[in-house]
Image (cartoon, grey):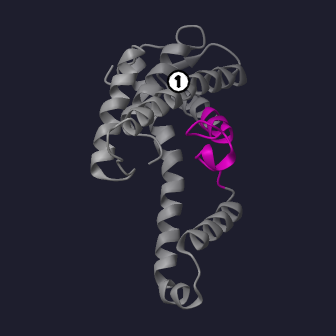
Amino acid sequence: MLLARELIGYLARQVVSGLSPKYLETHNPQAAADLIAAVIEEELQVEDRLNEEVRDLLSEYSDYMRREGVSYQDMFRKIKNTLISQRKVIRAAGRDTGDQMKLSRDKINELSHKAVAALRRGREFRLKKDPNEIRLEIVRILTELLVTEEKVDRAARAKIRTQKREITEGTEEWDLLHRRYYAEELKKLGIDMAR
């Protein structure tokens, strides 16, 4: 998934915290955070399932691609783009659309619409302002958090690059170092994912 579950939980808690009490009234903020986290996860899994479908399709044509000299990455990109346009899926990855954050602006907007709709359906929640005003506040909160997260990610990557020897991204060692440095950078900003 594009965002770690811990980050999704943190984003959801911060959205609820940012909405309460001015925009949202609830006696159970954790239920609201769980609901928003579920919305975010479901939306990100749409593209994960699409990626898996493309991989399955490509595995059937591996001999053809080898014979014709077609790159796996090029075919993956072409098929995925075709399926995205056919199914009208909004790309989750911001970097694919030119945004610097992990999530695209379009995906953040879609998440805000779905989060407001989910909160409106919930009996434990009362929206205190116009739904579009609340949606725009969710967009603002998520954007600020994701900009901060991007800075943290860049700082963690920079620390890895300062190692005496080159550590290749995608290796187990790189992943472990990134997780450690990422957590350290978050703590410097006073962000605790567990809270």
Residue behind mark 1: 148
- Res. 32 visible in picture: no
Q: Position of residue 135 (x, y in %)?
A: 66, 26
Q: Which residues are magenta?
A: 89-112
Residue at horizontal 64 percent and vertical 22 percent from the top: 140
**From what the image shows, is residue 117 above or below residue 48?**
above
Residue at horizontal 44 percent and vertical 34 percent from the top: 158
**Closer to the camera, 164 or 103?**
164
Residue 180 forms part of the magenta stretch: no
Q: Position of residue 141 (x, y in %)?
A: 58, 21
Total numbered labels placed on residues in the image: 1
**Closer to the camera, 3 or 29?**
3
Give, as a three-letter code, the residue at label 1: Thr
In the image, taking residue 4 as reference, residue 25 lies left or right, namely right
- Res. 148 visible in picture: yes
Residue at horizontal 58 percent and vertical 40 percent from the top: 103
Q: Residues within 10 Å of mark 1 (few under 14, many from 20)?
A: some
